[in-house]
Image (tube, rainbow, N blue to C red):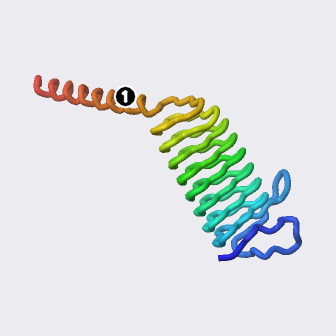
Amino acid sequence: MTDQSIPDPVAPESDLNAGQENMAGEGPEFTVTDQINAEHVQISQGGAGEIHATQVDIEQGGALRIDAQQVRIEQGGAGAIFGEIISLNNSAAGLVRAQDVKAEQSAINALYCDTADLGDSQAGLLVSRQVKGTTIRTGVLLASQVEGQVEAVLDTPRALLAGLAAGVGVGLVSLLGSLLRRRR
């Protein structure tokens, strides 16, 4: 694998011709590439469908899917990120599965990792062994160790209690239904 960068979209010639198109719209033009396989990928004001690499750096761009050991995204986004070390700053991601995640002022729909360090960030679902940071907002938090200010709609004890309550509720409805059928 080799280093591969998304070329400057303003440059007259591009060395990544297969599967790319220039998108016109408000703001600067950017380049979109379907699939990239390389050791190191750098994208600035561009995008890719799928990236397989050792290291990925994205600034003001995005990708649908990233498989890499190290991923750094600044003011960008990704649909799904799978890797070991992930760093997001002012960015968004749909699904993140990694060993270590650091996010600053970012949003993640579903985060599954070993350690999460989140600063002023939010996650819809956060599953981690260790979570630390400042101002963490999450819908569901499942973690064995938490350090910092966390605003969770449903944390680990509440999730267990909700599951227990749902089980009891379903059991009572089922029992009531069988008693009513016997009366007939």
Residue at the location (32% across, 30% down)? 164
Asked if residue 153 is positioned above or below residue 117 in the image, the reply reads: above
Residue 125, position as x, y percentages in the image: 51, 41
- Total count of labels: 1
Is 63 situated left or right of 138 in this image? Answer: right
What amino acid does circle 1 point to? Leu
Foreground of the two, 21 or 124: 124
Is 150 situated left or right of 47 in this image? Answer: left
Residue 146, position as x, y percentages in the image: 52, 35
Foreground of the two, 67 or 22: 67
Is 20 situated left or right of 50 in this image? Answer: right
Residue at the location (41% across, 30% down)? 157
Split into 4 quadrants, where in the image is the N terminus? Answer: bottom right
Split into 4 quadrants, where in the image is the C terminus? Answer: top left
Asked if residue 83 is positioned above or below residue 103 in the image, the reply reads: below
**Local secondary structure at mark 1:** helix
Asked if residue 88 is positioned above or below residue 164 in the image, the reply reads: below
Residue at the location (57% across, 51% down)? 100
Foreground of the two, 41 or 149: 149
Q: Which residue is mark 1?
A: 161
Asked if residue 89 is positioned above or below residue 153 in the image, the reply reads: below
Residue at the location (16% across, 29% down)? 178
Residue 167, position as x, y percentages in the image: 29, 31
Q: Local crowd at mark 1 within 10 Å, few (<14), some, or many (≥20)?
A: few
Residue 85, position as x, y percentages in the image: 60, 55
Rendering quarter of residue 138: top right
